C-alpha cells in the first residue's frame, strides 16, 4: 500500500518536473525574442516572392544607414491584401508591397495610412503613377513598378501600323490569308477581359469612373456608357462583323496563335517578356493606334504602403521614411522594378531602363489610366466583361450600344445596392 | 485499495483469460504497465507544457476568455486521462476536441458574423476608426510648404525640428510653440538638408526611434489652421485637418462647410446627405443582414432564381448519375462476362482523375469555337456562352464526375442482394422488370438512399464544379452578380468577396446560415422518408 502511494506521488512529481522542463524550453526563446525587439528597433515588411531578394537588399541598406533592423516576410501577393484584415497586431507588418488597385479597399478598411510627400519626392514620379495610389484625395503609397498591355507586332508578318485605318486594313488582310489566322490576338474568353480590351475602350472615348472636384474618382460618375463612347460604339459592331475582334478567343489561344505565326498582332503585357524574347520573332511593341482618342491601356502600378500597425509598433516615422523617401529614390526604384520585370515608376529610373522589351512596353503605356482603385470597381469588371463578350461574339452579337448601356445601368444598380 | 484490480496491470490480467482481446482493451493495455504509464505521463506533460506556453502568451495579450477556455480544456484532459475511471471519455476526448475546434467554433463564429456589420470598410474597432479618420483628414493646404527636416535638441535639451524650406531654401527651428527663422550664417546645408546648426545637437540613431510617438504628435504652429508636422524622419509638411472631432457629442464636423457626420449605429459616421467617412467600424447590427436578403430586391430576386437552379442542379445530378451508374452496374453484373474487369476499371476512370483537372479539361473541350466537342460534331453550340446551354454543360460535366461513384456503390450493393430473393420472386412468376422494381431496387435503395442524400447535399454546395467550369457565368442579364449557372454557394462567394463594395462577410454569413438550414431540412425530410424504405425488409 505504501509502495503504491509512493508510486503515485512520484508520478505526480515526475509530471510536474516534465511540465516545468517543457515549459522552460519553448519559453526561453520567446523571452529572447521580446528582448531583441526592445533592444533594436525592428521594421517588418511583407513582400511577394519575386521581389523578396531585392527588397531585402534595399531595405537592409536603408536599415543599416538608420541603425535599425528589418524583417522581410514572404507572402503570396494576394494574401498580402487579405492578410492585413486579419493579422494579429503583434505579428503585423509595418510596410507592405501591393497593387495600386488595393488602395481604395485598404484605405476604406483603415488598414493603411495616408502619406504626405514633400515636393521633391512628388517630382520624381509621373502624375498618373502617383494618382494610382491616391484615394479620396489622399496619397496612400509610393509607386515602384508599372505594367500595361501594348500591341505586339510580328514585324515579319505585318508592318507596325501608322494609323487605326492602316491597322484595321492590315489586320483584316492577314486574317483573310488563312482560316486559322486571327486579325488581333486579344484574349476575352471565357469570362471577358476588360483589362486587355481597355485600349479599344479608351480609344472610343470610354472611361470607367470620372473624377470629383478634389481629384478623387467618383463612383457616381460612371463613364462606361458616356455619350461620346456610345456615339462611337457602332465601330465595335463593325469590328465584330469584320471579325477584327472576337470574344471567343481565350488567353492561350491568343498566345499560341501569335507564337505559331497565326496572328501578327497580339495585345499583351510585360509578363510575357520572356516568351517574346525566346520566341525568336522580330517584333515591336507599340501603343494601339489612336481610334477616335488615344488608345491608352490600363495601368497596373505596384508600390509600397505603410500599415496602420506601424504607429502602434512605434515605427511610424521609420516606416514613412523608408516608403516615402528611400523607396522613391531612383536607384531603389530601378532595382525593384527590374526584380519582377516591370518598368519603374520613377521617371529618372525609367530613362535608364536598357531592357529593350520593357522599355517598349513602358512607352506603350504612356498616358495610361490606372485601373480605378476605389472598392466600387468590384462592381464593374463583370459588367464590362459581359458587354464586350456580347458585343463581339460574332454572329448574333448584341449591338455594342445596347450592351454597354446595359452594363452601365447594372453597374450603377450594383453600386447603389452594395 | 488492497485488491490487486487497482494496480496498473489490472486490465491485462483481467483480460488475460480471454484469448481474443477486443480492440479497445488492446489499446488500453498499451497504456498500462510501467512503460505505458511513462508514455502517458510524458504525453500529458507535453499537453500541459503546450497549454502553459499558450496560456502565458494569451495572458500577455489579455485574451482572458480564450485563456479561460484553455485552462478548462487542459484541466479536463488531465482529469480524464489521469483518473483511472472514465474509460469511454478517454476515447471520446480527441474527437470531441476536434469537433469543437473545427465544427462548433466556426459555426458559432459564422452565426456571430451574420449579426454583425463586417465588410470592407468595417473591420476596425470604433476607437481605431476615429483615430484613422482624424489622421487621414490631414492634408496639405493650397500652396502648403514642405521642408527637409532634422530633429535636434537645443542647449536646454528641448526637442526642436530643424527645417529647410524646399522652395526658398530658408532655414527654421520649429518648436511646439513657434516657427523661428535661423540666420543663414548659423546653418550648414548639404545635399540632404541641414547638416549642422549652431547651438543645436542632432538627434540620431536609437534615440530618434524612441521619439516615434513624440514625433507623430509634434506640431509646429504656423499661425493659420495648418501646422507643420513631421512625415517620416527627414521631411515635414504644412498640414491642415479637414475634419474636427467633437468627443462629447461623438461626431465629426467638416471644417470647410460645417457638415456634421453622426454615428449611424451601423458602423459609420454619416452626414445628412448620405455622405460617409471612411473607415467605418465593425459593429453588431442584429438581423440587418437577414432583412437585406428579404427586403432588397437586388439580393432577393437573384437569391430565389439561384435557389431554384441549385435545387435543380443537385437533384438532376444525383438522380441521373444514379440511373446511369445503376444501369452500368446491372449490365456489368453478369457473371462470366469477358473483359469485365477492364470495363469496370475504365468506367471508374472519371472518378480517379482529380475533379478540378477534369473540369478544366472540359472547359477547353466545350469552347464553342476551338473546343473538340463542336469540332467533332460539326456543331456550333455555345456550350458555355449561352445561359441555358451552360446549364446543360454544367449538368453533363457533373454527371461525368458523379456517375462512377454510383456505379461503384450500386455494383457493391447489387452483389449484396441475396440471389435467393430474386430467385424466389422469379419462381413466383415475376418478370425481369417486375423483379427489378419490386425486389432489387427497394433493397438497393436501403443501401444507396443515404448515399444519394449525402451526394445531394454535396452537390448542393458543389462550389468547385461551378467555379472551375463556368465561374457562375454567363451573366444572366439582369442587374445582379449572380450568373446563369451560379448555385447558392458560388453566389454567396461572389457576394462575400466581390459585392458592390468589396467583401461583405456579414451578408455572406447570413446566406451561409440559410443554406445550412435548407440543406438540413431537405436532408432531414429525405432521411425520414427513406426510413420508410427499410420497412420493406
Image (cartoon, rainbow, N blue to C red):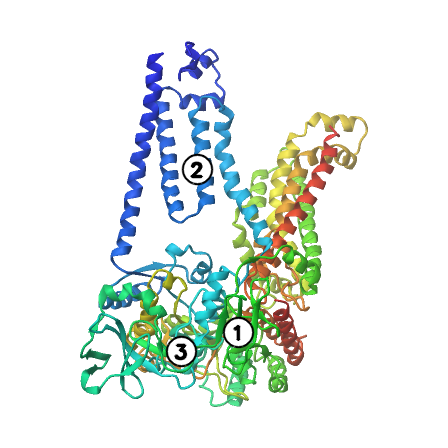
Residue in the foreground of this view, choosing between A116 and B327? A116
Cα–Cα span, label 3 and label 1: 18 Å
Q: Where is residue B96 shown, x and y percent of the image?
A: 51, 35
Cα–Cα span, label 2 and label 3: 51 Å
Q: Residue at x 42, y 30 (%)?
A: B78
Asked whether, in this view, residue A417 is left or right of residue B36, the answer is right
Q: Are marks 1 and 2 on the same chain?
A: yes
Residue B71, disc: 2
Q: Where is residue B279 shown, x and y percent of the image?
A: 50, 66
Residue position marked by numbered label 3 in the rendering:
B239
Asked whether, in this view, residue A215 is left or right of residue B448, the answer is left
Q: Is residue A48 above or below residue A131?
A: above
Mark toward the viewer: 1 or 2: 1
Q: Quadrant of the C terminus of chain A?
A: bottom right
Image-quadrant location for residue B493:
bottom right
- Which secondary structure lies at badge 1? strand
Q: Residue at x 75, y 35 (%)?
A: B436
Q: Is residue A369 above or below residue B338?
A: below
Mark toward the viewer: 2 or 3: 3
Asked whether, in this view, residue A169 is left or right of residue B238, the answer is right
- Which secondary structure lies at badge 3? strand
- Which secondary structure lies at badge 2? helix
Chain label for disc 3: B
Q: Earlier in the sequence, mark 2 or mark 3?
A: 2
Q: Earlier in the sequence, mark 3 or mark 1?
A: 3
Amino acid at each position: 500500500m505504501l509502495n503504491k502511494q509512493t508510486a503515485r506521488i512520484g508520478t505526480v512529481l515526475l509530471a510536474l518536473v516534465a511540465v516545468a522542463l517543457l515549459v522552460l524550453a519553448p519559453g526561453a526563446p520567446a523571452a529572447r525574442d521580446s528582448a531583441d525587439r526592445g533592444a533594436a528597433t525592428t521594421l517588418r515588411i511583407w513582400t511577394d516572392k519575386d521581389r523578396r531578394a531585392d527588397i531585402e537588399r534595399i531595405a537592409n541598406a536603408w536599415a543599416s544607414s538608420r541603425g535599425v533592423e528589418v524583417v522581410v516576410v514572404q507572402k503570396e501577393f494576394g494574401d498580402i491584401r487579405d492578410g492585413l484584415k486579419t493579422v494579429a497586431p503583434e505579428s503585423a507588418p509595418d510596410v507592405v508591397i501591393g497593387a495600386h488597385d488595393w488602395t481604395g479597399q485598404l484605405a476604406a478598411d483603415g488598414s493603411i495610412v495616408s502619406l504626405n510627400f514633400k515636393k521633391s519626392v512628388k517630382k520624381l514620379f509621373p502624375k498618373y503613377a502617383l494618382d494610382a495610389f491616391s484615394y479620396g484625395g489622399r496619397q496612400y503609397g509610393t509607386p515602384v513598378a508599372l505594367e500595361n498591355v501594348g500591341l505586339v507586332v510580328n514585324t515579319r508578318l505585318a508592318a507596325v501600323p501608322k494609323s487605326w485605318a492602316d491597322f484595321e486594313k492590315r489586320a483584316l488582310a492577314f486574317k483573310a490569308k488563312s482560316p486559322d489566322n486571327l486579325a488581333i490576338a486579344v484574349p476575352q474568353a471565357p469570362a471577358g477581359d476588360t483589362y486587355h480590351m481597355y485600349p479599344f475602350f479608351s480609344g472610343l472615348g470610354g472611361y470607367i469612373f470620372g473624377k470629383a472636384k478634389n481629384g478623387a474618382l467618383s463612383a457616381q460618375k460612371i463613364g462606361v456608357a458616356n455619350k461620346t463612347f456610345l456615339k462611337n460604339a457602332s465601330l465595335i459592331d463593325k469590328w465584330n462583323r469584320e471579325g477584327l475582334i472576337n470574344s471567343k478567343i481565350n488567353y492561350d489561344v491568343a498566345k499560341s496563335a501569335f507564337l505559331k505565326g497565326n496572328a501578327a498582332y497580339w495585345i499583351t503585357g510585360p509578363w510575357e517578356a520572356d516568351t517574346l524574347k525566346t520566341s525568336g520573332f522580330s517584333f515591336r511593341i507599340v501603343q494601339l493606334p489612336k481610334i477616335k482618342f488615344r488608345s491608352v491601356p490600363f495601368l497596373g502600378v505596384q508600390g509600397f504602403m505603410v500599415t496602420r500597425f506601424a504607429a502602434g509598433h512605434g515605427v511610424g516615422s521609420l516606416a514613412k521614411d523608408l516608403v516615402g523617401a528611400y523607396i522613391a529614390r531612383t536607384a531603389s526604384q530601378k532595382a525593384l522594378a527590374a526584380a519582377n520585370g516591370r518598368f519603374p515608376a520613377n521617371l529618372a529610373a525609367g530613362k535608364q531602363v536598357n531592357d529593350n522589351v520593357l522599355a517598349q512596353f513602358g512607352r506603350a503605356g504612356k498616358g495610361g489610366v490606372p485601373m480605378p482603385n476605389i472598392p466600387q470597381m468590384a462592381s464593374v469588371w463583370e459588367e464590362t466583361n459581359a458587354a464586350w463578350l456580347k458585343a463581339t461574339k460574332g454572329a448574333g452579337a448584341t449591338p455594342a450600344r445596347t450592351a454597354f448601356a446595359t452594363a452601365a445601368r447594372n453597374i450603377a444598380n450594383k453600386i447603389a445596392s452594395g | 485499495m488492497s485488491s490487486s484490480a487497482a494496480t496498473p496491470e489490472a486490465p491485462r490480467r483481467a483480460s488475460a483469460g480471454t484469448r481474443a482481446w477486443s480492440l479497445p482493451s488492446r489499446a488500453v493495455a498499451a497504456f498500462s504497465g510501467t512503460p505505458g504509464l511513462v508514455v502517458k505521463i510524458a504525453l500529458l506533460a507535453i499537453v500541459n507544457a503546450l497549454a502553459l506556453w499558450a496560456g502565458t502568451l494569451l495572458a500577455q495579450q489579455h485574451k482572458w476568455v480564450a485563456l479561460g477556455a484553455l485552462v478548462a480544456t487542459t484541466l479536463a484532459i488531465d482529469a480524464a486521462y489521469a483518473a483511472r475511471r472514465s474509460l469511454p471519455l478517454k476515447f471520446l476526448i480527441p474527437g470531441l476536441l476536434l469537433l469543437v475546434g473545427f465544427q462548433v467554433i466556426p459555426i458559432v463564429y459564422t452565426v456571430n458574423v451574420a449579426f454583425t456589420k463586417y465588410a470592407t470598410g468595417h473591420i476596425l474597432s470604433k476607437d481605431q476608426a476615429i483615430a484613422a479618420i482624424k489622421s487621414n483628414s490631414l492634408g496639405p493646404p493650397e500652396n502648403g510648404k514642405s521642408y527637409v527636416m532634422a530633429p535636434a535638441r537645443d542647449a536646454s535639451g528641448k526637442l526642436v525640428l530643424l527645417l529647410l524650406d524646399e522652395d526658398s531654401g530658408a532655414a527654421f527651428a520649429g518648436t511646439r510653440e513657434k516657427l523661428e527663422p535661423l540666420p543663414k550664417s548659423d546653418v550648414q546645408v548639404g545635399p540632404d538638408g541641414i547638416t549642422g546648426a549652431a547651438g543645436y545637437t542632432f538627434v540620431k540613431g536609437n534615440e530618434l526611434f524612441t521619439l516615434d510617438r513624440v514625433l507623430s504628435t509634434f506640431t509646429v504652429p504656423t499661425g493659420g489652421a495648418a501646422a507643420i508636422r513631421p512625415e517620416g524622419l527627414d521631411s515635414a509638411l504644412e498640414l491642415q485637418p479637414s475634419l474636427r472631432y467633437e468627443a462629447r457629442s461623438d461626431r465629426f464636423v467638416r471644417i470647410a462647410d460645417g457638415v456634421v457626420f453622426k454615428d449611424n449605429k451601423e458602423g459609420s459616421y454619416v452626414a445628412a446627405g448620405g455622405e460617409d467617412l471612411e473607415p467605418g467600424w465593425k459593429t453588431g447590427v442584429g438581423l440587418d443582414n437577414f432583412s437585406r436578403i428579404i427586403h432588397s430586391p437586388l439580393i432577393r430576386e437573384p437569391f430565389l432564381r439561384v435557389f431554384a437552379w441549385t435545387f435543380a442542379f443537385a437533384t438532376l445530378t444525383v438522380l441521373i448519375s444514379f440511373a446511369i451508374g445503376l444501369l452500368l452496374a446491372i449490365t456489368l453484373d453478369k457473371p462470366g462476362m469477358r473483359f469485365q474487369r477492364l470495363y469496370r476499371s475504365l468506367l471508374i476512370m472519371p472518378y480517379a482523375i482529380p475533379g478540378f483537372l477534369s473540369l478544366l479539361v472540359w472547359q477547353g473541350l466545350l469552347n464553342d469555337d476551338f473546343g473538340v466537342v463542336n469540332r467533332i460534331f460539326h456543331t456550333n453550340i455555345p456550350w458555355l456562352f449561352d445561359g441555358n446551354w451552360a446549364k446543360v454543360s454544367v449538368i453533363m460535366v457533373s454527371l461525368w464526375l458523379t456517375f462512377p461513384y454510383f456505379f461503384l456503390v450500386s455494383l457493391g450493393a447489387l452483389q449484396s442482394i441475396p440471389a435467393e430473393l430474386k430467385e424466389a420472386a422469379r419462381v413466383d412468376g415475376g418478370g425481369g422488370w417486375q423483379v427489378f422494381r419490386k425486389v432489387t431496387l427497394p433493397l438497393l435503395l436501403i443501401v444507396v438512399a443515404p448515399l444519394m442524400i449525402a451526394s445531394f447535399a454535396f452537390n448542393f454546395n458543389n462550389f468547385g464544379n461551378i467555379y472551375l467550369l463556368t465561374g457562375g457565368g454567363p451573366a444572366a442579364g439582369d442587374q445582379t452578380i449572380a450568373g446563369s449557372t451560379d448555385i447558392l454557394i458560388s453566389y454567396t462567394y461572389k457576394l462575400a468577396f466581390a459585392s458592390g463594395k468589396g467583401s461583405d462577410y456579414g451578408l455572406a454569413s447570413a446566406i451561409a446560415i440559410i443554406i445550412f438550414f435548407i440543406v438540413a431540412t431537405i436532408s432531414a425530410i429525405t432521411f425520414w422518408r427513406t426510413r420508410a424504405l427499410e420497412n420493406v425488409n
